[in-house]
Image (cartoon, rainbow, N blue to C red):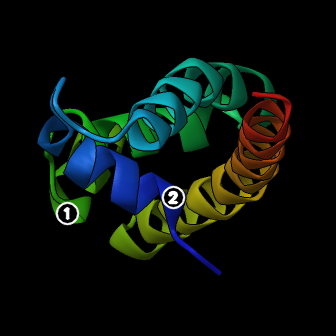
Amino acid sequence: MIDFVEEYMTDCNQFTEDGFDEQKIMMKAISKALPVIIKNELTPRQSLCLRMFYIHGKSQIEIARELKLSQPTVSRHIKTAKDITNKFLGYCIYSVKQANELWLKMN
């Protein structure tokens, strides 16, 4: 399975205005869907661990200390959050690709 979370969080700044239209559309779709998925599909703890790890750049050990959890528990929260998020982003990306293909056929 493709890790959309890892790809988006590490590559989102590499797409410039000069990039391919399909890339821009895909990144825009992910940027709109990701917060909704995180809010509606993850537990508060999964969401917090995911944000601390990717957005704030904290290590699993730092997160564990801050939240008073074990590092393996933090690791499980991050893995579960990524699995759930990747599943829903996969649906989103599939839908965008299908819409792009239909649009190209119509034009």
Q: Position of residue 100 (x, y in %)?
A: 72, 38
Toward the viewer: 35 or 79? 35
Label 2 vs 1, first from the N-terminus: 2
Q: Is residue 8 left or right of residue 39?
A: left
Toward the viewer: 4 or 40? 4
Does 53 sit above or below residue 52?
below
Instruction: Tell me the crowding category of disc 1: few under 14, some 14 to 19, or many 20 or more residues within 10 angstroms, Cα based.
Output: some
Amino acid marked by disc 1: Ile
- Residue picked out by circle 2: 4
Q: Position of residue 87 (x, y in %)?
A: 76, 58
Q: Residue at x 23, y 51 (%)?
A: 11
Q: Is residue 69 visible?
A: no
- Residue picked out by circle 1: 61
Q: Residue at x 49, y 41 (%)?
A: 22
Toward the viewer: 67 or 1? 1
Q: Is residue 3 visible?
A: yes
Q: Position of residue 3 (x, y in %)?
A: 51, 69
- Secondary structure under tag 1 reads helix
Instruction: Tell me the crowding category of disc 2: few under 14, some 14 to 19, or many 20 or more residues within 10 angstroms, Cα based.
Output: many
Toward the viewer: 55 or 16? 16
Q: Mark 2, mark 1: which one is toward the viewer?
A: 2
Q: What is the spatial separation of the Cα atoms under label 2 and label 1, in whole angstroms?
A: 24 Å
Amino acid marked by disc 2: Phe
Q: Residue at x 67, y 64 (%)?
A: 83
Q: Quadrant of residue 107?
A: top right
- Secondary structure under tag 2 reads helix
